Image: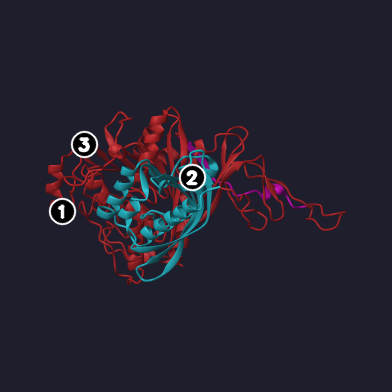
Amino acid sequence: MSLNVEWQRRDYSRVPYWLYHDTDLYNHEQKLIFRGTTWSYLCLEAEIPETGDFKTTWVGDTPILVNRNKDGKIHAVVNRCAHRGAAVCRHAQGNTKVHTCIYHRWSYDLTGNLIGIPFQRGIQGLGGMDDDFDKADHGLRKLRVACFKGVIFGSFSENSENIEDYLGPMMQGHITRLFHKPIKVLGYQRQRIHGNWKFYLENLRDTYHASLLHEFLVTFGLDRATQKGGVEMDKRHRHNLTYAHASSDSDLDAKEAYGGNKINSDKLKLLDPSLLEFHQEYADDRNLAISTMFPNASFQQLNNSLATRQIQPKGVDAFDLIWTYFGYTDDDIDMTNHRLRQLNLFGPGGLVSMEDAEAIEIAHKASSSEERDSTTVIEVGGKGEISDRDYRVNDVPIRGFWSYYAELMGIEPEGAFR
Amino acid sequence: MIETEKRFAIEDLFSAYASCLDSDRLEEWLDLFVEKCVYKIVPKQNLTLGLPVTLMLCENKNMLRDRIASLRQANEYSIHTDRHLISNVCIKTESDANTFMVEANYALFQTDNEGNGCLYSFGTYVDEVLFDENIPKFLCKTVIVDNWSIPHMLSTPI
């Protein structure tokens, strides 16, 4: 199939709904995006600190096994036996010297090389494989791996940029800020959202929905569009950072901007405000900084809640969202408890995040029957040029997402904005 | 051996718990907890891995009240009704004659606004029940979710 997308605007301010619902397009995304020249988030080094530690994950809908080898180096391979296609490792995480497929016991070392085949020579000369079978030709498919500040990335392509260039100064800066000292993983949350993965990638790039959809934020003054903040993107506009500065607006500013109808802070106060305490722990006073990396991850700080989010597409109609929470190894018990308390705000049941799943599911459900010329409208913060904004009411990074998506998929309109 | 009356009272507490959640009487549900209560929902995998992250963590009744106030006044969530089935209630006496460790299994079915239902969540309650003037209430309630990849989202308590 050759892809043919009729963009109504070359600045991606109109996106056809069928792009969220088409199975052929989904298969192309797997090949051209997830198994293409991008880098994907795999996991954190802190999750596999010891030799032999492993973790299984997904890049797009390809199963991945990440290992720490004897020399400390990290290897990522496709978790699919070279023999008959079974998942070699069936565990979420653990420690091992060797990975053996249960089906016919083919075994692989921690770099993915095939090291053992039962009955290769048959039994008493009967059965077995021909002499020209070479184990070296039948290892697990290897990904390129790069670690940046303790975050592990993988790429299927030999032609992708190096990780520093792929991230660019903005993403590098944000990851460096969050991972400026050793971390410890506090645990996981996971949810399955019944909508196309791209709806979520857009959600993460749409700064201004937060203070409208997530009423908790506004009601309790945690994050409002009237705060000082904005969006930054990398040079190619494929990643983005949304940020806000703590206590940079007043209830009065907010009431004016929201027309009074969303600001209930006069009558609504938390009985236990400890949930919202903010202990400044970086050089800046940002209480919110959430970056999103194309194509599958987000790195978040809201107050003292720190997490990565990983997006795993599960067909055109669903994706899994995995939240990995962390603190720093030098956190004292009070700080750890504070972070654990604050994760009430995030995850599948987060006071400021539960709505995202609902918004995505109702958008997915309601748009599936649309004609090919029916589109979304993306022009808050203006049309045309795709660039950073030093104000919060905009969804410009969504257009950045689509511009890079279209480039990778080979479906850019003539004279496309990038 | 636990007194029969107390056993019935604990079973009634679980019935009231299910009934309040299933008929959206969340404010009444709060009355089933003591003031110094702890309520948490824990993904089973974290428990297995020895990691402390929860899905919901209320360390006192005010945090629980805040959660309900937020659901009522701020949050937007999937329109649904709940149906809890609670069984295998196992009561163990504590050293203190008024405090009991109680474990039970739960299954929570959810129905959407078009009448379609699913088995939304299942797992175990590991609870501490305190008798205050012969009325049992939850001192600590831990919901351990077996199917810890949450379908859709988590809004109303389990």
Check the residue under mark 1 and report the chain it is in.
A
The reply to whether the C-beta atoms of the residues labelled 1 and 2 are less than 8 Å apart is: no
Question: Quick one: label 3, few (<14), some, or many (20+) residues within 10 Å?
Answer: some
Vertical comparison of A176 with A405: above or below: above
Question: Quick one: label 1, few (<14), some, or many (20+) residues within 10 Å?
Answer: few
Q: Which residues are magenta?
A: A132-148
Determine the secondary structure under disc 3: loop
Q: Position of residue A48 (x, y in %)?
A: 54, 38
Please give left or right for residue A117 compared with residue A391 in the image. Answer: right
- Please name the color used to draw chain A: red
Please give left or right for residue A77 compared with residue A121 in the image. Answer: left
Check the residue under mark 3 and report the chain it is in.
A
Vertical comparison of A406 with A373: above or below: above
Measure how far apart labels 1 and 2 are at the Cα level: 47 Å
Please give left or right for residue A391 compared with residue A417 in the image. Answer: left
Quarter assignment of residue B139: top left
Residue receiving disc 3: A247
Residue type beneath disc 3: Ser
Chain letter tied to cyan: B
Residue placed farthest to the right in the image?
A124
Please give left or right for residue B5 compared with residue A246 in the image. Answer: right
Q: Which mark is residue B100?
A: 2
